[in-house]
Image: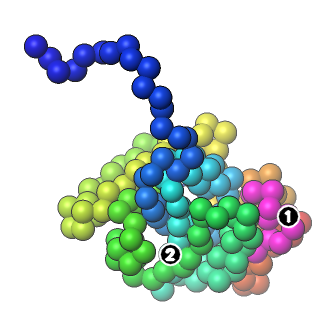
Amino acid sequence: MSNHHITNDSTPLPPREGQGGGVLLFPGSFDPFTLGHADLVERALQLFDEVVIAVGINEQKAGWIPVEERVRAIRILYKEQARVRVESYSGLTTDFAHSIGAKVILRGVRSIKDFEYEMQMADVNRQLTGIDTVVLFADPRYASLSSSIVRELAHFGKDITAFLPEGYKASPPTPLSKGRGGSLRQ
Ligand code: ADP
């Protein structure tokens, strides 16, 4: 006989906030941090105690917004949320995860293309380090939104504020004057 009875007892659900899931690392380029990223953070806060948003420093590519600027602007967005921290890091994401005591990495998936890439990364990371990855699927409202599309639109002088969190309006990050991308201030 199976152990898996469907029972009818009304065990109370655990509290919704945090859920005791520990520290979750959300690594990315966030160049810029968009509404799609913000949606993932909100949802992750329902599952984990603390979310560390970490801007990866890419030594090969300066990017559009300087890393310190990205960190500064994202910190302002979450200044009222004690369970969110914002950092930058260089090197391997799993090494950084270890250094902050995060056992889980968060990534978002919008499409099959994201799915294949994220599955490979998650697999390698878990096999090599034991650090697992949770994936949240993009909310349909943001499934076509990417930082690169936002940079492209800015480059051609379009208003990109509709794709960015409200909090950016007060203190948007300042992109590098050179390179691809225009100003965040429209
Ligand atoms: P990276 O260069 O590491 O992919 P990004 O800043 O582009 O950094 O993305 C960080 C994470 O957020 C990735 O897992 C990406 O798939 C996810 N992501 C990006 N945009 C969205 C979105 N609109 N909805 C859901 N997830 C997203």
- Looking at mark 2, is its residue's CB closer than 8 Å to ligand 1? yes
- Circle 2 Cα neighbour tier, 10 Å, few/some/many (<14 / 14–19 / ≥20): some
Judging from the image, what secondary structure is the residue with disc 2 in?
A: strand
On the image, numbered disc 1 is attached to which residue? 169
Please name whichever residue, 186 or 20, is drawn nearer the observer in this view of the structure: 20
Q: Which residues are magenta?
A: 164-173
**Left or right of 72 in this view: 84:** left
Q: Position of residue 164 (x, y in %)?
A: 75, 57
Q: Please state which of residues 95 and 48 is positioned toward the viewer in this rendering.
A: 48
Label 2–label 1 contact, CB within 8 A:
no
Q: CA distance from mark 2 to mark 1?
A: 24 Å
Q: Is residue 10 visible?
A: yes
Query: Is residue 141 depicted above or below 100 in this figure?
Result: above
**Magenta stretch: helix, strand or loop mostly:** loop
Q: Secondary structure at mark 1?
A: helix
Label ID, residue 87: none
Tell which residue pokes out farthest to the left in this image: 1
State the residue in front, 177 or 19: 19
Q: Is residue 138 visible?
A: no
Residue drawn 68% across the image and 61% down it: 81
Q: Position of residue 18 (x, y in %)?
A: 52, 50
The vertical placement of 17 against 95, above or below, is: above
Q: What is the three-letter code of the residue carrying label 2?
A: Gly
> Which residue is labeled 2 in the image?
56
Q: Is residue 114 left or right of residue 66?
A: left
Tell me what residue is drawn at x 45 percent, y 51 percent: 20
Dividing the picture into quarters, in which one does residue 86 lie? Answer: bottom right
Q: Residue type at mark 1?
A: Lys
Question: Where, by quadrant of the figure, is residue 140 drawn?
Answer: top right
Where residue 158 sits: x, y (%)? 83, 59
Asked whether residue 167 is drawn in magenta, I would say: yes
